Amino acid sequence: MRKSAIAVMAGLAGLGLATVAATAGVVKDDGLKPYEIVGDIAIPKPLTDKPGDPARGRKLIANRKKGNCLACHKIDQMKDYPFHGEIGPDLSDLASNMPAEEIRLRLVNPKVINPDTIMPAFYRVEGLYRVMKKFRGKPILTAQEIEDIISYLVTLKKPEQK
Ligand code: HEC
């Protein structure tokens, strides 16, 4: 009797880990660092203790196997890379419009903000579909890569507004 009770508890603990509280509170996802979504719009705390590296973030934004953000977004400050898409909003003045904590949720899981968005959830394991085999069970970006990208995005301001 005792043994099976322990087995049931272990099973429940496993389920608990895989549960994602989609709208509020602490979110736990397989193998991911826990984070807290506040007000369905922001993740105020950085995912890592190490500050983001903006130069690394800029490269990740352009990297087609990583952020690939330019496929959908125009960023004037990154004209050294060709072919910017226009499916998503122009990010060239993002820092004037959106604080880092809201950018963080956009990158981690934009579906919390807009369930119908075509923008991928970059720090999510469950619920991903059309994922290449090598990405299964892993988020597209690591927690540190998310912070690197945010640290570059918060520098994006149109020159006349500086
Ligand atoms: C497949 C296309 C696609 C890709 C790839 C993509 N996005 Fe998006 N993104 C969108 C769309 C569409 C929106 C508009 C909002 C929505 O759909 O909810 C958006 C919205 C945003 C917003 C909010 C902008 C605003 O003014 O409201 C930010 C910030 C953003 N994306 C950053 C990124 C970054 C950084 C990357 C790369 C790591 C990225 N996106 C990759 C399609 C994409």
Image (cartoon, rainbow, N blue to C red):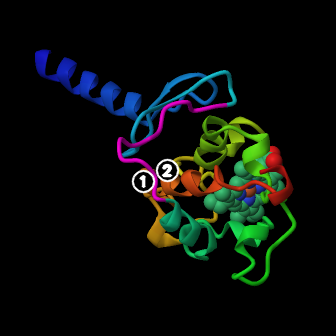
Residue 134, can we see it?
yes
Q: Eyeballing the image, is 80 above or below 88?
A: below
Residue 72, quarter of picture: bottom right
Identity of the residue drawn at 60% across and 65% down: 67
Q: Is residue 54 left or right of residue 101?
A: left
Q: Eyeballing the image, is 76 above or below 102?
A: below
Instruction: Give amino acid for label 2.
Output: Glu
Residue 138, quarter of picture: bottom left
- For the record, the magenta segment spans 42-53
Instruction: Tell me the number on the disc at residue 144.
Output: 1
Say what secondary structure mark 2 lies in.
helix
- Percent position (x, y) of residue 78? 71, 73
The quarter in which the N terminus is drawn is top left
Say what secondary structure mark 1 lies in.
helix
**Helix, strand or loop: magenta stretch:** loop
Q: Is residue 70 left or right of residue 54?
A: right
Spatial CA span between label 2 and label 1: 5 Å
Q: Residues within 10 Å of mark 1 (few under 14, many from 20)?
A: some
Instruction: Give amino acid for label 1.
Output: Gln
| Residue contact between numbered discs 2 and 1, judged by CB atoms under 8 Å | yes
Which residue is more in the foreground, 29 or 147?
Answer: 147
Identity of the residue drawn at 58% across and 67% down: 58
Q: Residues within 10 Å of mark 2 (few under 14, many from 20)?
A: many
Residue 111, quarter of picture: top right
Identity of the residue drawn at 79% across and 81% down: 83
Residue 66, can we see it?
no
In magenta stretch: residue 52: yes
In magenta stretch: residue 103: no
State which image quarter holds ligand 1: bottom right
- Percent position (x, y) of residue 104? 60, 42
Instruction: Tell me the number on the disc at residue 147.
Output: 2
